[in-house]
Amino acid sequence: MKKQPIEQISKQISAPLSAISSPQRIAILLLIGKGEACVCHLEASLGWRQAYISQHLMALRKADILQDRREGRYIFYSLKDASILNLVTVSATLSGLSAETVSTLINTQIHPSCECPQCAPALIPASSL
Ligand SMILES: [Zn+2]
């Protein structure tokens, strides 16, 4: 195997790091966690405009960090490789937070004002999707 120059390797390594290097994107990763989330769920949880959230989701998908799947009128986003959460956890501890702080946030949490199939499965019967 041909040895790659360090500049090239470093550039490749920096790609996922720079893709997640904003508080907004970290928040999205934490909310998606090891499960999946639709835009409406992120909207309800974060209180941001949908267009703004979509913009970040698109960038994360382009960076190969997120994948999506459609189910009826919902598009669910999930992490392509959940080990990115380890990266987030390491960064959290470097910033002085405890790993527990992160692990309690890493989850697809049910949000009271969200009507996605995960938060309100009773409101939207799976058969109608
Ligand atoms: Zn939801």
Image (cartoon, helix red, strand yellow):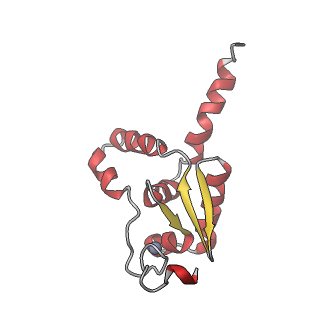
Does the rendering let one see residue 73?
yes
Q: Nearer the viewer, residue 67 or 24?
A: 67
Residue at x 35% of width, y 58% of height: 105
Question: Going by the image, does 82 lie left or right of 98?
Answer: right
Q: In this rendered view, identify the residue nearer to me: 41 or 128.
A: 128
Q: Nearer the viewer, residue 85 or 98?
A: 85
Considering the image in quadrants, where does the C terminus appear?
Answer: bottom right
Q: Is residue 23 left or right of residue 49?
A: left
Q: Residue furthest right?
A: 2
Could you tell me which quadrant the N terminus lies in? top right
* Residue 97 visible in rendering: no
Q: Farthest residue in the front direction?
A: 127
* Residue 123: % across, % down: 45, 86
Above or below, 83 against 51 in this view is: above
Residue 49 x, y percent position in the rendering = 57, 74
Residue pictured at 49% horizontal, 72% vertical: 41
| Residue 13 at x, y percent in the picture | 59, 32
Q: Which image quadrant for residue 39?
A: bottom right
Total tally of numbered discs in the picture: 0
Q: Residue at x 44, y 46 (%)?
A: 85
Lateral position of residue 76 relative to residue 99, left or right: right
Residue drawn 62% across and 27% down? 10
